[in-house]
Amino acid sequence: MGHCGQSLWSKGRLKQAMNTSISQQLANFTLDLGLDNIPLEIQTRAKHLILDAIGCGIAAKEEDFAKRLSASVQRLSGLGERAIVGQAMRLPLRDAALLNGVLMHGLDYDDTHAAGVAHLTVSTLPAALAMACTHKRTGSAFLLSYIAGLETGARLASVVKGGFHQVGFHPTGLIGVFACSLVAGKLLNLSIDQLVKAQGFALSFACSNLQFIEDGSWTKRIHPGWAASSGITAAHFAQDDIPSPTLAYEGRFGLFVSHLPPDLLKLSDLDLATAGLGSIWETQNVAIKPMPACHFVHACADAAIAIHKTGLDYRQIKSVKALIPEGVVKSVGEPEHSKRRPTSDYDAKFSVHYCVASGLIRGKLGLKELQTQALIEPDVLALMDKTSYEVDPLSTFPKHYTGEVQVTCRDGQVLKHRVDINRGNPDAPISNEDIKAKFLENCSLHLSAMKAQRLFDVIMDIDKQQDCLELEQLMAINNGA
């Protein structure tokens, strides 16, 4: 395909540069994908991404959002057969995918595809697991469907180069439903035409909104699970050959035209939707989070922690300036009066002011530093009032989520620390060993060491498993956890 904007669309109509639509190309890739096509290191990395998401879901077990949203979903759906990460309940297929997505994403500790600025594992994994268990698919089929969803979703999210965030859409939910329709469709053994139909249904189901940023509300937590549930629905409608749009992406009212204004559409590149399919693996470009907060604040938080380690007495600070990419200002920098007074842990995760203050004062930003009491400590409040942001003119966003912190002391001394590549980014990756350590640490909050190790072993050997039922059973928490 050609580039987005006027080179591809004119007066709202597609100028097709190829005979094969994006939906068809993604369907072909999904249907043809086999483990023998995927390098071993990519399969191994995918297993570690699965580990990371399940560990995040287990760690969320006692969180207020986990308890309340679990109760709401259970009340709506009733009993079922599918297991829930970190919980004892069982739910029907789609509701299990919904709630597992909520729990895996809820701490904002899960992975992010860097260029696409999207959390893809926490939608594609719940969809793949619920479908594989329901339809008694092998562990290798489960792994294949997950990788197919990750690879296709990453490309679709990358097309807009961060543009969805600028107009209030969250690509995790918006793009996740397309990826999940392909995940579910692969596990249903759909045909090429049916996989195209599934993406057509996804176009009507795709949704998510960033308004939560202004008040720290919980809707973002629902986005990946809703995408998983909707993708499963789309695939089942397609299985019955119900008609749906065939040009989900390039059409006159396709995904990108309908969700981007003309200026951002011109900056997009539709070629990226299918670039390198089967030869370049976006799975290795997924960033693992070292901190349970929005990825956009990580570089500044690490910069603040580095300054803390110099021995600076934070009580001598006169002012603080955080340099952040222009593309993240609406998410973590504005409105400043709200970012300086986060009212919840989720609010704080999206406040560069809070994350920098925590780093400068405490030298860390973990789950403990995001508890309610930590947000209202007088010294933290005072330092947030001294903190402001500016756009980072040297940022390479979205390739890297850059950050710099500049501290001016009362005696005139200025301390600076810059992070050009955020920790966990594909260019500064967290190793598989680090991912395992994070997984075991998260599991240790609620699982015995023996069960956590068994869960690790099953996931790392999932392609040899006859089904996914043991994985599903192990990730749930019963009284004998």
Image: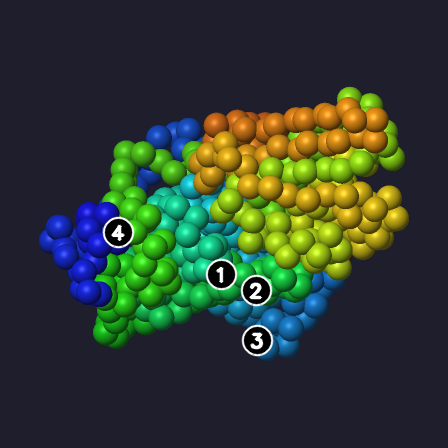
* Residue in view at x 50 percent, y 32 percent: 394
- Which is nearer the eye, 379 or 277? 379
- The disc at residue 354 is none
- Is residue 332 visible in the rendered image? The answer is yes
What whole-number distance in Å separates the C-alpha atoms at marks 3 and 4?
Answer: 41 Å
- Check the image and report above or below for 191 versus 35: below
Question: Where's residue 193, x and y in %?
Answer: 20, 62
Q: Amino acid at mark 2?
A: Gln
Q: What kind of element bears circle 4?
A: loop
User: Residue 77 got which mark?
Assistant: 3
The residue positioned 64% from the left and 77% from the top of the image is: 75
- SS at mark 3? helix
> Mark 2 highlights which residue?
211
Q: Is residue 139 above or below residue 337?
A: above
Determine which quarter of the picture holds residue 251: bottom left
The residue that mark 1 highlights is 168
| Mark 2: secondary structure | helix
Looking at numbered disc 4 in the image, what kind of residue is underneath it?
A: Cys
Q: Which residue is mark 4?
A: 4
Q: Residue at x 13, y 50 (%)?
A: 17
Q: Earlier in the sequence, mark 3 or mark 1?
A: 3
Tell me the SS state at disc 1: loop
Residue 365: horizontal and vertical position, in percent? 73, 40
Q: CA distance from mark 1 to mark 2?
A: 7 Å
Q: Which numbered disc, 3 or 2, marks the residue that appears first in the sequence?
A: 3
Asked whether disc 1 touches disc 4, contact meaning CB atoms under 8 Å apart, the reply is: no
Q: Are marks 1 and 2 in contact (CB under 8 Å)?
A: yes
Circle 3 or circle 2, nearest the eye = 2
Question: Are dots 4 and 2 in contact, CB under 8 Å?
Answer: no
- Quadrant of the image occupied by residue 63: bottom right
User: Along the horizontal axis of the image, is 245 left or right of 413?
Assistant: left
